[in-house]
Amino acid sequence: ERGKPFIAKRLMSYLSFFHGAEVRLFDLDEYRKRAKQPEGSDEAAELLLGELKEFMESSSTEAAGNLLTAMGRKSSQSASLEEPSSTSDGAPITPTDRRCKNVDSGKVAILYSTDSYSAFSEKWSGTSKERRRWAAEKLQSERVLNAKLIFIEV
């Protein structure tokens, strides 16, 4: 892989390994295809927003376990929390694993496109000031997400 998908996957690896962040990749082309609508349709944008909300609002069992450990209350109630069995790359997690951080760096959603030409007209593509403004306003209107937005040009 080259270009945007490569950078997105490297950024995901960096943030999850060095900062302990829960990271998920969202490919704009995948949502455009799943919506089965013409390019630039509102259905694809709403489908992506729905999955963004689901990801950002979901609770992380790893974060809950880390919080309980930090508070010194790793008791029987924390034992009921599921420990994640593997990382995003499929590698198993053990308590002695160096990748297992005792921090909660939050969640990071990375939006990218495998085909920049076909995703050019998508609302989430960020290819123009209007689309970037739309994305910022859309995330700001969803206050429960408490999301910050950064655009990276590749």
Image (cartoon, helix red, strand yellow):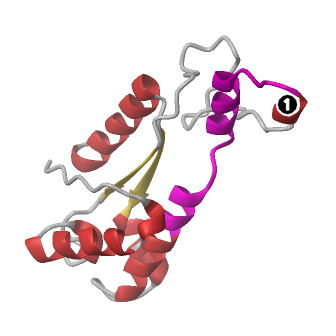
User: What residue is drawn where x is 44% and y is 72%?
Assistant: 49
Helix, strand or loop: magenta stretch: helix
User: What residue is drawn where x is 67% and y is 38%?
Assistant: 64
**Number of numbered markers:** 1
The magenta stretch is 51-75
Kindly identify which residue carries mark 1.
79
Q: Is residue 1 visible?
A: no
Q: Is residue 97 above or below residue 83?
A: above
User: What residue is drawn where x is 31% and y is 54%?
Assistant: 148
Q: Secondary structure at mark 1?
A: helix
Label 1 amino acid? Ala
In terms of depth relative to the viewer, which is nearer, 3 or 23?
A: 23
In terms of depth relative to the viewer, which is nearer, 81 or 96?
A: 81
Q: Is residue 81 above or below residue 70?
A: below
State the quadrant of the N terminus.
top left
Q: Is residue 74 magenta?
A: yes
x, y percent for residue 116: 21, 63
Q: Is residue 33 above or below residue 61?
A: below
Q: Quadrant of residue 33?
A: bottom left
Q: Is residue 122 visible?
A: yes
Question: Taking 150 as reference, is 147 left or right?
Answer: right
Question: Taking 125 as reference, is 80 left or right?
Answer: right
x, y percent for residue 77: 86, 35
Q: Residues within 10 Å of mark 1 (few under 14, many from 20)?
A: few
Q: Is residue 13 above or below residue 61?
A: above
Question: Which residue extends farthest right?
Answer: 76
Q: Is residue 14 magenta?
A: no
x, y percent for residue 120: 19, 72
x, y percent for residue 55: 54, 58
User: What residue is drawn where x is 55% and y is 13%?
Assistant: 98
